[in-house]
Image (spheres, helix red, strand yellow):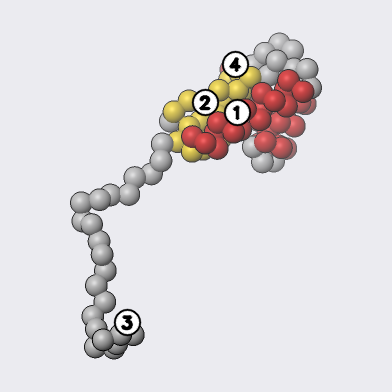
Amino acid sequence: MGLNDPGREEQAVTDQDSEIFEPPMYKVLLINDDYTPMDFVVEILMTVFNKTIEAATQIMINVHKKGVGICGVYTFEIAETKTETVHRLAEENGYPLRSAMEKE
């Protein structure tokens, strides 16, 4: 019998014991410093984290007032890449801006 035999029953292979788990998520945080200009922080939030100017401004205000602000929540690899991008861009522009990852 061939693979396209209409009399042949299709049998799905399933494993009832296996579960699909969501990957752990990580918050990317910006940390306040006394040297990085607010407009640079807003620019970082818009370019690296795809925030609107309104959202970026609000996060920047949180960073300024609370010492830290949440930029977004991502899988580990994406959070790591965004954190490294912030550090690289800050360094290239001569600012000490830092970001960090925190497991959610």
Work out how far the residue at label 1 is from the one at label 3, CA to CA, in angstroms. Answer: 50 Å
Q: Taking 68 as reference, is 76 left or right?
A: left
- Observer-side mark, 1 or 3, equals 3
Marks 1 and 2: in contact by CB < 8 Å?
Answer: yes
Instruction: Mark 2 or mark 1: name the one nearer the start of the chain.
Output: 1
Marks 4 and 2: in contact by CB < 8 Å?
Answer: no
Dot 2 alpha-carbon crowd within 10 angstroms: few under 14, some 14 to 19, many 20 or more: some
Q: Indicate the secondary structure of the residue bearing disc 2.
A: strand
Q: Relative to residue 18, is residue 66 depicted above or below?
A: above
Residue under label 1: 83
Work out how far the residue at label 1 is from the one at label 4, CA to CA, in angstroms. Answer: 17 Å
Instruction: Mark 1 or mark 3: name the one nearer the start of the chain.
Output: 3
Q: Which residue is drawn at 32% across and 49% down?
A: 20
Q: What amino acid type is highlighted by mark number 3?
A: Leu
Marks 2 and 3: in contact by CB < 8 Å?
Answer: no
Q: What amino acid type is highlighted by mark number 2?
A: Met
Instruction: Mark 3 or mark 2: name the one nearer the start of the chain.
Output: 3
Residue under label 3: 3
Residue under label 4: 67
Residue under label 2: 101
Q: Taking 34 as reference, is 72 left or right?
A: left
- Where is residue 32? Give x, y as percent: 64, 16
